[in-house]
Image (cartoon, rainbow, N blue to C red):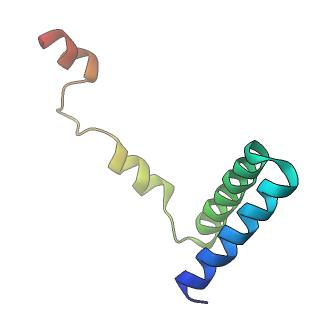
Amino acid sequence: METSQFAAILAFAFVAAWIGFGFGEAVLCLLGAGLAYGAALVARGEVDLGEMQDRLRPPAGAPSRSARARVR
């Protein structure tokens, strides 16, 4: 399946949920689908959560946010 076809199916499903349930519930359906997709990526080993945490942490010698705020 091409990306454009997947996007069209996703857009159709979102609009159908919006019409059937309302906008807030449609957004929740979309959020739930995204979380399930992320969990499937982690389960298949395509996303390494440990590596992701390492990327989000500041380097060991970097000052913390609170230390940078006091300097200003």
Q: Is residue 11 above or below residue 72?
A: below
Q: Residue at x 17, y 33 (%)?
A: 61
In the rendered structure, the answer to whether residue 32 lies left or right of residue 52 reads right
Q: Residue furthest front?
A: 19
Q: Residue furthest top?
A: 70
Q: Position of residue 11 (x, y in %)?
A: 66, 68
So how many labels did they put on this image? 0
Q: Quadrant of the N terminus?
A: bottom right
Q: Residue furthest right?
A: 20
Q: Residue furthest left?
A: 71
Q: Is residue 3 above or below residue 47?
A: below
Q: Position of residue 35 (x, y in %)?
A: 66, 55
Q: Is residue 18 above or below residue 58?
A: below
Q: Position of residue 17 (x, y in %)?
A: 80, 58
Q: Is residue 35 above or below residue 43?
A: above
Q: Position of residue 45 (x, y in %)?
A: 56, 70
Q: Looking at the rendering, which quadrant does residue 64 occupy?
A: top left
In the rendered structure, the answer to whether residue 47 lies left or right of residue 5 reads left
Q: Residue at x 18, y 32 (%)?
A: 62
Q: Quadrant of the C terminus?
A: top left
Q: Looking at the rendering, which quadrant does residue 36 occupy?
A: bottom right
**Residue closest to the eye, 25 or 70:** 25
Q: Residue at x 36, y 44 (%)?
A: 56
In the rendered structure, the answer to whether residue 42 lies left or right of residue 17 reads left
In the rendered structure, the answer to whether residue 23 lies left or right of residue 49 reads right
Q: Residue at x 87, y 56 (%)?
A: 20
